[in-house]
Image (spheres, helix red, strand yellow):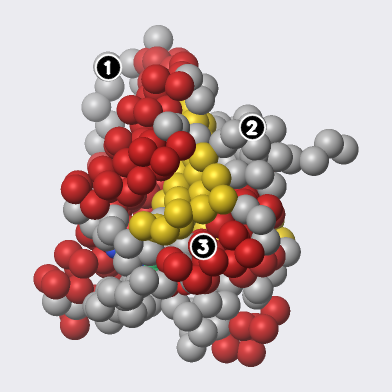
Amino acid sequence: MSEIRFDNRVAVITGAGGGLGKTYAVELAKRGCKVVVNDLGGSSDGTGASPMADQTVAEIKAAGGEAVANYDSVSTPEGGEKIIKAATDKWGRVDIVINNAGILRDKSFLKLSPEDLSIVLDVHLKGAFFVSQPAFKVMKEQGYGRFLFTSSAAGIFGNFGQSNYGAAKMGLVGLSNVLAVEGAKANIRSNVIAPIAKTRLTEGLLGPLANMLLPEQVTPLAIYMVSEACQLNHEIISVGGGRFARVFVGLAQGWAAGKGKVPTVEELHENFDKVMSPEGYIIPKSIQEEMGLLMKALV
Ligand code: NAI
């Protein structure tokens, strides 16, 4: 099997001063990639700032790799532009963006303040948008690009006390899906991972499992998914503790009332087991595939 390399490729990794992002930066650099190590360097609730990215860059350079630090916040359009400009100014291109920066403001729904909502949406969802938009422009011109977004089981499946975070993390699935559709012709691929690993964000949350969930067990998937060898697009992969599993949004065959018919509430009630049956589901890659299924039911 040939080694997966990233020579002449340029990656931007947000939130790469520590945790999962740092492992991606170090591994990509080891494989020949030039890396922009972005990190605002705040605390895990999104307050403060520090030159945390320097440590990752120092480690990469000490191992003979190439990297630059960037300390801008992902959460503003200007920050996003500057992060991508750090790559184009230094190396003239951007091949890979790993949207990884993240914070937590966990509270049960009724206790959540508007500020807890805004800051979490700003970093995770808007932040990924602000970094990806200028990168998409560059990738389109190059005719090559790989996006990786970091979602979470908290959004995909739901978790107590994470309504702000869950909404942001599921929003990223929507963003990635649209980039997968819009970028396909320009050889741009966009995918999502939903990791589980012991980092400063989760240390207190994983209980006795924590020491079996190493960040390094997530790294190979992230590296593979941003490589040229990976042709996946519009996918979500769950990863943790060395286990890798596809997550998908399926569309079942459903029940159709009949051409031109408006069913009664009772008729719908009677047929609800067919509405709910997963039998014969498809995994649509775009809205067109749902329309295809709908047309079949109508004609
Ligand atoms: P981490 O706290 O070690 O890493 C997140 C990094 O993002 C930090 O270094 C932080 O300084 C940086 N950051 C925060 N706000 C920023 C901003 N505005 N601009 C630039 N950088 C910023 O935590 P971890 O676990 O490595 O998190 C990485 C990603 O994985 C996050 O998006 C997180 O939500 C996600 N995730 C992690 C899980 C886990 O089990 N560790 C579970 C599911 C998702």
Residue 266: image location, x then y, percent: 29, 43
What's the residue at 65%, 75% (across, down)? 213
Taking depth in this image into account, of 161 and 34 the one nearest to the observer is 34
Numbered badge on residue 228: 2
- Contact between marks 1 and 2 (CB within 8 A): the answer is no
Question: Looking at the rendering, in which quadrant would you find the N terminus?
Answer: top right
Q: Tag 2's secondary structure?
A: loop
- Contact between marks 3 and 2 (CB within 8 A): the answer is no
Taking depth in this image into account, of 261 and 246 the one nearest to the observer is 246
What's the residue at 38%, 36% (across, down)? 88
Identify residue for label 3.
Answer: 57
Numbered badge on residue 260: 1
**Some atom of ligand 1 lies within 8 Å of the CB belonging to the residue at label 3:** no
Structural distance between the alpha carbons of marks 3 and 2: 24 Å
Q: Amino acid at mark 3?
A: Val
Ranked by sequence position, the earlier of labels 3 and 2 is 3
Lateral position of residue 131 relative to residue 271, left or right: left
Lateral position of residue 281 relative to residue 118, left or right: right
Structural distance between the alpha carbons of marks 1 and 2: 48 Å
Q: Amino acid at mark 1?
A: Gly
Ranked by sequence position, the earlier of labels 1 and 2 is 2
Q: Amino acid at mark 2?
A: Glu
**Total marks drawn?**
3
Taking depth in this image into account, of 285 and 211 the one nearest to the observer is 211
Residue 121: image location, x then y, percent: 24, 60
